[in-house]
Image: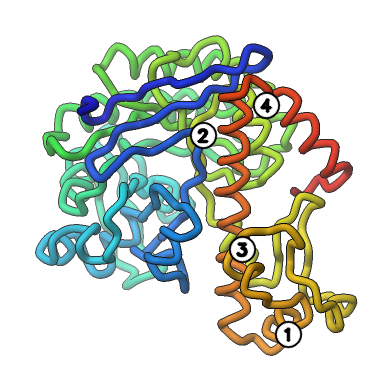
Amino acid sequence: MSELFSFDIEAEDPQTGARAGVFHAAHGDIPTPIFMPVGTKATVKGILPDTLREIGAKVILANTYHLSQRPGPELIDGMGGLHVWERWDRPILTDSGGFQVFSHNEHVKLSDDGVTFRVVDYDGSYVTWTPEENMRIAQLLGSDICMQLDVCPPYPCDRAYLERAVDLSSAWAERCFAAHTRPDQTLFGIVQGGMDLSLRRESLHRLETIGDFKGYGIGGYSVGESHQTMFESLAPLCMEYMPRTKPRYLMGVGNPRTLVEGVGIGVDMFDCVLPTRTARLGTAFSDEGRMNLKNARFAKDDRPIGTDCGCPACTQGFSRSYLHHLIKQKEMLGGILLSIHNLWYLLDLMRRARCAIIDHSYKAFQEAYLDRLGDARDF
């Protein structure tokens, strides 16, 4: 039996930084590269667990901030933890909630001890999180992987704020590491530093000196910067400085182009609400870019979203015409079917990427995929 929370690299592409591996978690193995569907409030909106398993989801997310507010971690723990409560028997990752906390802007007060924030999207009360309290919540939720409490800086911001974000994130990582004691759950550190590679390297170095984190999140990207700006620091960070033997998790990124390029520089794990949020607005993913099913040109189109797509929405014959009607009429089935399709698309994209890595042909796979997308820059 493989050691719990270990990472095995199965193949590395000789012409890129792409690698295929397996992360061994308490509720099963996670093959990488992988996209992880987001179930913010303990549900991937509108999709049954059996459907998630059918489309190939190996691990899903839940959000510590939202679940700490409603229904509360004590209730979830009393119900047997997230896996029992939401009927999901595969791995779960919970983020720290730090991104949501710092999105409250003027309602946030930082200190060396932790962060105080106003829960304006719930009852308006003020809450203080220390790293120790954040770990207490994470351990009650019972996910396989939890993330340290960190400071997620906005973009753009000045260097002084970035330096403070790295300092606090590093100090909080040490306290999270000391406070985390649940043996069937592992803790990932988070590399911060904005677009500044030197600060990213400093953040990583501090995490490595704290202890044996079983993986590393890469936070603070996809916060408003351009695609090119992101990769100017992300590419060297992954390919030259991050440890080879630990999984690398690019947090909050679900754009297919970015996934394919991210795999090429050695990223292993991705998550984002993009495929389901855009689905509820009528958008479908395809190898040619995004399709807006609201457009009148789909009203009499009897083809499925993807003519060679293997998702349940396409294989069961739901037409673009029917989906156009559902979306225009704001019927919930439209968003559900498009969510299933978009999640299947990203999961299958990562399956294809993994096969190409194992075949040592990832460079050709990446070039062919990006060529098909052409100028679809929003994809």
Q: Amino acid at mark 3?
A: His
Marked residue nearer the N-terminal end (4 or 2): 2
Q: Of tags 1 and 2, which is closer to the observer?
A: 2
Give the residue pinned by disc 2.
33
Evaluate if marks 4 and 1 touch, with contact meaning CB atoms under 8 Å apart: no
Give the residue pinned by disc 4.
231
Evaluate if marks 2 and 3 touch, with contact meaning CB atoms under 8 Å apart: no
x and y percentages locating residue 198 in the rendered image: 55, 13
Q: Is residue 234 something that shows in the picture?
A: no
Marked residue nearer the N-terminal end (2 or 3): 2
Q: Amino acid at mark 1?
A: Lys
Q: Secondary structure at mark 1?
A: helix
| The N terminus lies in quadrant | top left
Give the residue pinned by disc 3.
341
Evaluate if marks 1 and 2 touch, with contact meaning CB atoms under 8 Å apart: no
x and y percentages locating residue 200 in the rendered image: 51, 19
x and y percentages locating residue 176 in the rendered image: 22, 32
Q: Is residue 326 above or below residue 342?
A: below
